[in-house]
Image (cartoon, grey):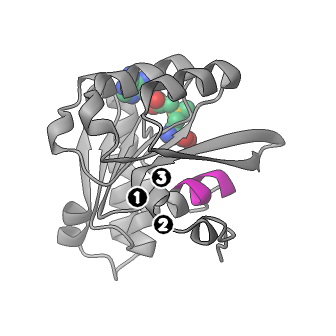
Amino acid sequence: MTFSLRIQKIYSLCEGLFIWDICCDHSLIAILNLKENRFQKVYCIDKSFQSLEKTKKHLEKIKLFNHYIREDNISEKIEIQCIDGSLLNWEKVTGSVIIAGVGSHTCLKIIKSCPESKRADLTWILNPFNYLDLFRTEIKKLFSETVSLEEHTVIESSRERVIFKLSHQQCMRSRKDKALPFQYD
Ligand SMILES: C[S@@+](CC[C@H](N)C(=O)[O-])C[C@H]1O[C@@H](n2cnc3c(N)ncnc32)[C@H](O)[C@@H]1O
């Protein structure tokens, strides 16, 4: 299985123990984490039952062809929930939240569903596919000034994609730390 540079970049920007991949579709981030094992668990959230069924089929194949990945390891590492991201129980959410590959309006709607007091506790990796100027304006209203904002650009299928990272912890670290280049083998 191959992972696009965009998916690799999104994964590389995550921090904390857990990833909540909202709008995950076929849950590539969770599958990448089975290989890389940087996070304790990836929660895969999508409103489409069909998308999550495809994830389950992928996982069956992985179990068949990768004998080093045990079944109990997969169930420890991945949890799948079929719900609309804006209906998530945010109290349980910690670590990094990914919302990627959807329109800006969907992305903003899901962020707004997270209580304001909780937003700064999380690292947000956001990759909306349209209306980026509107998105930039709106996220400034949704996050306090103590949250740092980074933008990373990657090319996928000849298209420029912008990945936004919002993180409170990042702000606490030195600026030098922030400038580390992305590397992935
Ligand atoms: C193009 S896929 C993106 C997959 C992956 N995140 C990526 O970046 O490649 C968009 C997915 O978002 C899901 N989706 C759209 N709106 C959603 C919502 N409000 N809550 C949960 N999932 C949603 C769709 O069902 C679809 O599977």
> What range of the chain is rendered magenta?
5-10
Closest to the observer: 181 or 56? 181
Q: Position of residue 85 (x, y in %)?
A: 32, 28
Q: Which mark is residue 169?
A: 1
- The three-letter code of the residue at mark 1 reads Gln
Residue 122 seen in this snapshot? yes
- The three-letter code of the residue at mark 3 reads Leu
Instruction: Classify 10 Å Cα crowding around label 3: few (below 14), some (14-19), many (20 and above).
Output: many
Instruction: Classify 10 Å Cα crowding around label 1: few (below 14), some (14-19), many (20 and above).
Output: some
Residue name at image x 42 percent, y 34 percent: 144
90 displayed left or right of 39: left
Mark 1: which secondary structure? helix
Picture quadrant where residue 92 is located: top left
Q: Which mark is residue 28?
A: 3
Q: Residue furthest bottom?
A: 68
Q: Which residue, given by chain and number where applicable, does mark 2 sit on?
A: 173
- The three-letter code of the residue at mark 2 reads Arg
- Label 2 or label 3, whichever lies nearer to me, is 2
